[in-house]
Image (tube, rainbow, N blue to C red):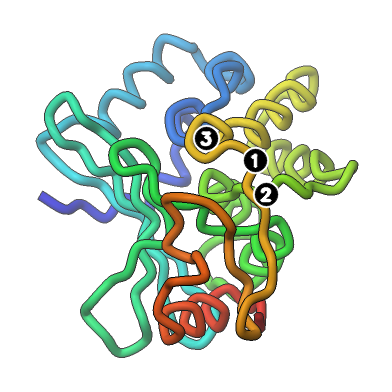
Amino acid sequence: MLADISLWLDDRLFWPAFLLSVGGSDTAAVAFDVDPADVEEYAEQLHHPDSWPFISLPLGGGHGLHILFRNFEDDAGWDYLLQPAGSDTVTTLAALEGCFQGPGLSWPELLVAAGQPDPARSWSERLLLLLPALGDADLPHDADEPIISAFAAVGGLSQQRYKVAHELLTASRRFWGDPTWTEYADRRVRLGRHSPRGPAAPPDRLALIAEALGSGS
């Protein structure tokens, strides 16, 4: 059963549980002023097969993004699903665990998408929610700075900020290594396997993603 858990983002245990399980930061469980045992229990609730929680974010052009906890029994994963404006259909931007499709975002796209207007969620919250879909071999040397800022804004402990930021930035390598991005037919594409944004992707899908992420190309 699908369950909208957007309001759960205000729970004290949400961010350590999300950054631990979806974000891939082992340190996140002890990086907030909460009991790590409670974090583990909360994470189990997020991944219980009785429901499939999701979180929705508005994107550019009136499009939307749904982060879905795909809670099959003994086979959990997370899908980043793009819903075009005015449509009931969705297209996969990234799938973490299971079929491993992605990455969904390059570094510049992550920053632009995090800053898009959102009446319900802050830049920091959007950045951290989108971050697991990132994959980019060409990260700037100061890439940890916005991650550290966002981590602090959601209640992370300062003494853990560098370690958590490093773990969050490198976690995506477990899915698709260090992918590279390039321009193809005036759109940004990812070179490599398992990508819904490869050069062979339908042009209308690439155009939709570019508009939604505000990348332009």
The residue lying at 47 percent from left, 52 percent from top is 102
Residue identified by numbered label 1: 178
Earlier in the chain: of badge 3 and badge 1, it is 3
| Image quadrant in which you'd find residue 97 | top left
The residue lying at 74 percent from left, 20 percent from top is 160
Secondary element at image label 2: loop
Q: Are marks 2 and 1 in contact (CB under 8 Å)?
A: yes
Q: Nearer the viewer, residue 39 or 215?
A: 215
Earlier in the chain: of badge 2 and badge 3, it is 3
Residue identified by numbered label 2: 136
Determine whether, in the image, residue 88 is placed left or right of residue 23.
left
Residue identified by numbered label 3: 23
Secondary element at image label 1: loop
> Which amino acid, by three-letter code, is at mark 2?
Asp
Determine whether, in the image, residue 87 is placed left or right of residue 28.
left
| Image quadrant in which you'd find residue 82 | bottom left
